[in-house]
Image (tube, coloured by chain):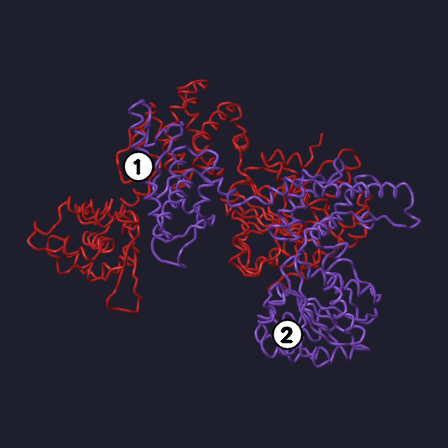
């Protein structure tokens, strides 16, 4: 029983059957007239690229098969053979790679003049295609491999120069006009009556030009999009341009307008579709755990779907957490059917993962290595203690003590500076965030107790200034650092430093090194040596840890911070 | 001929019309302009009169179609083998053997982006030998145009009238010194060589773009095309695109074709056209078309709508059905922005709501820190309320500061880093835009503007699949 390519495609992409049918509908017969341009849009990780690539390669890349009777199969096979050997009918370009018009043109020409990239016959693999968004290097590797393969089978045509639209249009005509065996094949076979028809007399097969991440096109050249939209009209040939993007068409429109593409929207996956996709991720060797896996997938979906719409992220989470989920089962601590126990066991990890959602501070292999080694012990379950009131108010502390995921804060803790440099940085932070008019109040070294504000009066002052008509949203803390003259910062520096600064501490060298570390940012141009102004480029959290390490109470000196 | 073949023929024919690859069956509402343009071209060909004109009109009103139709008719009249397909003819221009009464040079402002390129293209289209001899010469434009013309004169027996079609005329006017336009108009005015220069543009002020010396050489003839003003005209154009003609199905009156094939084809055509007519009488369908007409009067908008249903034609359902158009109409009309927003996560939605509140307080440009602060304020408040509720029901705050709100959904305050990632995603989707062109410094403090208005945000909150009531209430609150 031969399964048709269409069925294969539908199976490979759960929940995308309608879109695949639509695309195929627009494509029609290989030589049929197509819409001049299509725009496929939808949020990231909805399978836009993967679906299109698989559809094109199955239909035009020699991967197609099927047919109901034996003669059809035979002609199909002949067709496939031709497709694999002859110049490709489609070019698939990524606008990140092809960032200038010239690159786009030349890559398109190259791909259209050479056989389609090799692939396993008729197989459309979901994971690998989906993951291609992240694995740039992997892609490159595949490209070189396919190029190598091509070199072995047929000598590829030379790389052709094409610098402007004019030449590209010329090339398109040339490419579309070259009649090869495939076109002849269509003509010789009786079922392609349309070829001899009046309208499609000289029509060869339709060429497709697919541009992934098309939003980048807008940066390349102003008229390029208009050109591509009406490439069919300009060349007068059967050529269809397909754009894939995450943003809406309105953002593409140029000032003078132009031909509008047909918009095809890829909707969000539903729960059952997501689960079906995740089902495919289960490695074959763990097939016996399918029940458990599906239960786990269900759980992950329910916990995360609200906050994480990105399918790739959910897949990442499943891949990360599933080994942890089944670990106690494998060790024999918990039986498979004890769902509640397992649930409680994994909950702690969920909380942690939720905190790190999307961040991917460490690679997944690193993560699994660490968690599997450290978390072997106390997995007694139970929820962690309620947040310990950090900056965010609620810092979740997952049980088990030592944490698998290092935070960015840890990195900051490790970072160290010389003693005086720390004070310079603190002083510049204060200079950046405090209004200069309050410097007298905070830093003047007049008879100590009188002038320094008490905590209470400070709060009162903050109330008076901050909570007026604008609300408290225009506080300096939220607006970001302000530039300050170096002299002011130095004054603050000498004021907050209790002891006398030793002679040999070269403050200006330290400032220069902070600038080169990008912790201070120089606002005035480099050639101006007088009255230098700087900005403090360091976060509040980092300053707090710095201040703690020098036992300096920074909160006493900050105006209107929370 | 089987039904399948007939359907495939019909599909090809209609989609070729929809894609504007083949010309429409009839001109509707453009007869006047057509006559004038045709007359102008004909005079150039017959009497060697040089002329120039501009055809102005909004996009999709048939400027290019008009010219193509005129050229086709001229070709037919002067007995040359003009091909049906647009763009085919220039390659078939063999100067030496086929006698032609005129030549056509097609230029497009989008393709020929400077004068040198345009000149090369002219020479390529006029003759292949011309390209090899003149194409590589690096002389200036004004030198090579006369040399091109003299070359043509020397090479052939008579002066061929040349018709220059300049699509996207306004873009040619932006070339430096407008030397191409100057020379073309100059030749046209000085009557050295019979040429007709026809510019097509959608810019109504195209004439103002011309330099004084160029403008004075232009004949100041312009014709306007307008979108169909009458709903019936619009319907006629739409209907013409969908109705099948005998040629579409290869029904010929030849002796060869007479037979059962012929009859089935004719029957199919009749039935198909009948269905199309009833389609236009269908209430729901008319509503869809009327809506397009009211919104933009653009024929292409209707064509876009038709692609889907036409592509769906098959052996099983060989005729167009009104229900197909409802769906397709909905699909093309849907606000893709809200569609994209439906896929945002709760955190992103919360940030958007925070932005909405900021904007309502007339803080039009904001940075991440402000948004996060607003978001935090809300969450703090929600936590307080959540703990109060939980103290009563002893449920509530579970681990790690997530709050079980009344409808069983846990909210949690995300850390800044996670929220920043979400914020950046909004920027990537271009819902937020940097307020200033570039600014140094930490990205948290970069000022942004929102590209949605408050009502759109509340709309999204309402449409969002699983937005907890507490968040929805927050979104609805004012100020």
Other residues around mark 1 within 10 Å, as few (<14) / some (14–19) / many (≥20) = some
- Rendered colour, chain B: purple
Front one among A43 and A161: A43
Q: Name the residue nearer the viewer: B306 or A41.
A: B306
Labels 2 and 1 touching (C-beta < 8 A): no
Which of the labelled discs sits on residue B181, or is there none?
Answer: 2
Q: The numbered mark 2 sits on a residue in which chain? A: B
Left or right: residue B128 compared with residue A54 = right
Q: Is residue A151 visible?
A: no
Indicate the secondary structure of the residue bearing disc 1.
helix
Q: Chain of mark 1?
A: B
Q: Is residue A364 left or right of residue A532?
A: right
Q: Is residue B52 above or below residue A102?
A: below
Which disc number belongs to residue A246?
none
Quick one: which residue is furthest to the right in this view?
A: B255
- Residue at numbered disc 1: B380
Rendered red, the chain in question is: A
Please tell me which residue is depicted at 46% across the width and 18% down the height of the picture.
Answer: A337
> In this orientation, which residue lies closer to the viewer: A12 or B52?
B52
Please state, as top left, top right, bottom left or bottom right, where the C terminus of chain B lies in the image: top left
Q: Can you give x and y, in whole percent of width and height, for residue A88 in the image? A: 67, 50
Disc 2 on helix, strand or loop?
A: helix
Q: Are marks 2 and 1 on the same chain?
A: yes
């Amino acid at each position: 029983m031969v399964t048709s390519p269409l069925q294969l495609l539908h199976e490979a992409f759960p929940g995308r059957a309608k879109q695949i049918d639509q695309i195929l509908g627009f494509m029609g017969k290989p030589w049929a007239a197509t819409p001049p341009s299509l725009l496929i849009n939808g949020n990231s990780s909805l399978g836009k690229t993967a679906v299109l690539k698989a559809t094109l390669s199955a239909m035009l890349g020699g991967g197609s098969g099927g047919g109901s009777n034996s003669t059809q199969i035979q002609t199909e096979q002949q067709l496939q053979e031709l497709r694999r050997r002859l110049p490709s009918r489609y070019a698939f370009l990524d606008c990140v790679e092809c960032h200038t018009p010239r690159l786009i043109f030349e890559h398109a020409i190259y791909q259209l003049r050479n056989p389609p990239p090799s692939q396993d016959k008729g197989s459309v693999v979901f994971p690998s295609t989906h993951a291609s968004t992240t694995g740039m290097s992997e892609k490159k590797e595949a490209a070189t491999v396919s190029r190598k393969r091509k070199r072995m089978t047929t000598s590829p045509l030379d790389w052709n120069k094409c610098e402007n639209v004019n030449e590209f249009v010329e090339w398109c005509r040339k490419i579309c006009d070259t009649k090869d065996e495939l076109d002849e094949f269509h003509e010789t076979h009786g079922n392609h009556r349309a070829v001899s028809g009046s309208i499609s007399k000289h029509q060869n097969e339709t060429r497709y030009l697919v541009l992934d991440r098309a939003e980048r096109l807008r940066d390349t050249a102003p008229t390029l999009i208009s050109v591509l939209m009406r490439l069919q009209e300009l060349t007068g040939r059967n050529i269809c341009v397909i754009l894939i993007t995450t943003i809406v068409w309105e953002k593409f429109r140029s000032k003078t307008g132009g031909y509008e593409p047909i918009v095809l929207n890829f909707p969000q996956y539903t729960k059952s579709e997501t689960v079906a996709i995740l089902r495919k991720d289960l490695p074959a060797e763990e097939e016996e755990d399918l029940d458990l896996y599906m239960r786990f997938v269900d759980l992950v979906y329910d916990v995360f779907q609200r906050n994480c719409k990105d399918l790739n992220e959910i897949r990442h989470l499943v891949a990360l957490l599933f080994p942890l989920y089944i670990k106690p089962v494998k060790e024999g601590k918990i039986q498979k059917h004890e769902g509640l126990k397992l649930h409680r066991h994994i909950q702690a990890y969920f909380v942690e993962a939720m905190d790190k959602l999307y961040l991917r501070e460490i690679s997944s292999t690193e993560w699994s290595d660490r968690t599997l080694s450290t978390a072997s012990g106390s997995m007694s379950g139970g929820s962690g203690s309620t947040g310990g009131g950090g900056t965010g108010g609620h810092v979740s502390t997952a049980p088990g003590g030592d944490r698998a995921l290092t935070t960015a804060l840890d990195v900051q803790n490790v970072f160290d500076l010389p003693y005086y440099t720390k004070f310079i940085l603190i002083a510049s932070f204060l200079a950046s965030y405090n209004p200069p008019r309050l410097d007298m109040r905070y830093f003047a070294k007049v008879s100590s107790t009188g002038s320094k504000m008490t905590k209470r009066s400070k709060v009162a002052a903050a109330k008076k200034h901050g909570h007026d008509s604008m609300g408290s949203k225009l506080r300096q803390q939220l607006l970001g650092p302000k530039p300050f003259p170096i002299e002011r910062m130095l004054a603050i520096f000498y004021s907050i430093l209790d002891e006398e600064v030793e002679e040999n501490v070269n403050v200006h060298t330290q400032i220069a090194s902070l600038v080169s570390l990008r912790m201070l940012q120089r606002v005035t141009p480099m050639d101006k040596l007088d009255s230098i102004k700087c900005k403090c480029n360091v976060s509040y959290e980092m300053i707090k840890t710095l201040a703690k390490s020098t036992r300096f109470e920074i909160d006493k000196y900050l105006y209107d911070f929370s | 001929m089987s039904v399948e073949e007939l359907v495939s023929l019909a599909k090809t024919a209609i989609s070729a019309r929809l894609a504007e690859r083949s010309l429409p069956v009839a001109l509707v509402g453009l007869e006047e302009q057509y006559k004038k343009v045709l007359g102008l071209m004909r005079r150039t060909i017959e009497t060697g009169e040089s002329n120039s004109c501009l055809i102005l009109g909004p996009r999709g009103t048939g400027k290019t179609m008009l010219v193509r139709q005129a050229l086709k008719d001229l070709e037919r009249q002067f007995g040359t083998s003009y091909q049906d397909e647009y763009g085919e003819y220039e390659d078939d221009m063999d100067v030496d053997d086929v006698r032609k009464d005129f030549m056509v040079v097609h230029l497009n402002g989008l393709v020929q982006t400077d004068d040198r390129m345009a000149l090369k293209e002219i020479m390529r289209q006029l003759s292949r030998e011309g390209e090899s001899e003149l194409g590589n010469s690096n002389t200036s434009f004004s030198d090579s145009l006369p040399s091109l013309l003299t070359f043509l004169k020397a090479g052939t027996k008579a002066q061929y009238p040349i018709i220059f079609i300049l699509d996207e005329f306004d873009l040619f006017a932006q070339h430096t010194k407008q030397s191409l336009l100057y020379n073309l108009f100059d030749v046209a005015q000085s009557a050295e060589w019979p040429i007709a220069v026809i510019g097509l543009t959608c810019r109504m002020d195209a004439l103002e773009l011309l330099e004084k010396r160029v403008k004075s050489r232009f004949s100041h003839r312009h014709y306007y095309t307008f979108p169909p003003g009458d709903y019936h005209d619009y319907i006629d154009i739409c209907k013409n695109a969908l109705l099948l003609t005998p040629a579409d199905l290869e029904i010929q009156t030849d002796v060869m074709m007479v037979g059962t094939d012929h009859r089935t084809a004719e029957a199919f055509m009749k039935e198909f056209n009948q269905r199309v007519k009833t389609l236009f009488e269908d209430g729901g369908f008319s509503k869809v078309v009327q809506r397009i007409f009211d919104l933009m009067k653009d024929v292409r908008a209707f064509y876009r709508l038709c692609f889907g249903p036409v592509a769906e034609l098959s052996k099983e359902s060989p005729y167009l059905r009104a229900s197909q158009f409802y769906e397709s109409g909905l699909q093309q009309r849907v606000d893709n922005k809200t569609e994209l927003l439906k896929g945002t996560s709760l955190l992103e939605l919360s940030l958007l709501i925070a932005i909405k509140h900021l904007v309502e307080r007339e803080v039009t440009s904001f940075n991440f820190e402000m948004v996060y602060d607003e978001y935090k304020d809300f969450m703090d408040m929600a936590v307080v309320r959540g703990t109060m509720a939980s103290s009563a029901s002893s449920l509530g705050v579970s681990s790690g500061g997530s709050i079980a709100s009344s409808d069983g959904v846990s909210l949690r305050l995300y850390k800044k880093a996670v929220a920043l990632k979400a914020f950046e995603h909004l920027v990537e989707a271009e819902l937020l835009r940097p307020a200033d062109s570039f600014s140094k410094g930490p990205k948290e403090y970069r000022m942004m503007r929102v590209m949605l208005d408050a009502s759109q945000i509340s709309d999204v909150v309402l449409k969002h699949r699983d937005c907890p009531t507490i968040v929805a209430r927050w979104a609805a609150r004012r100020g």
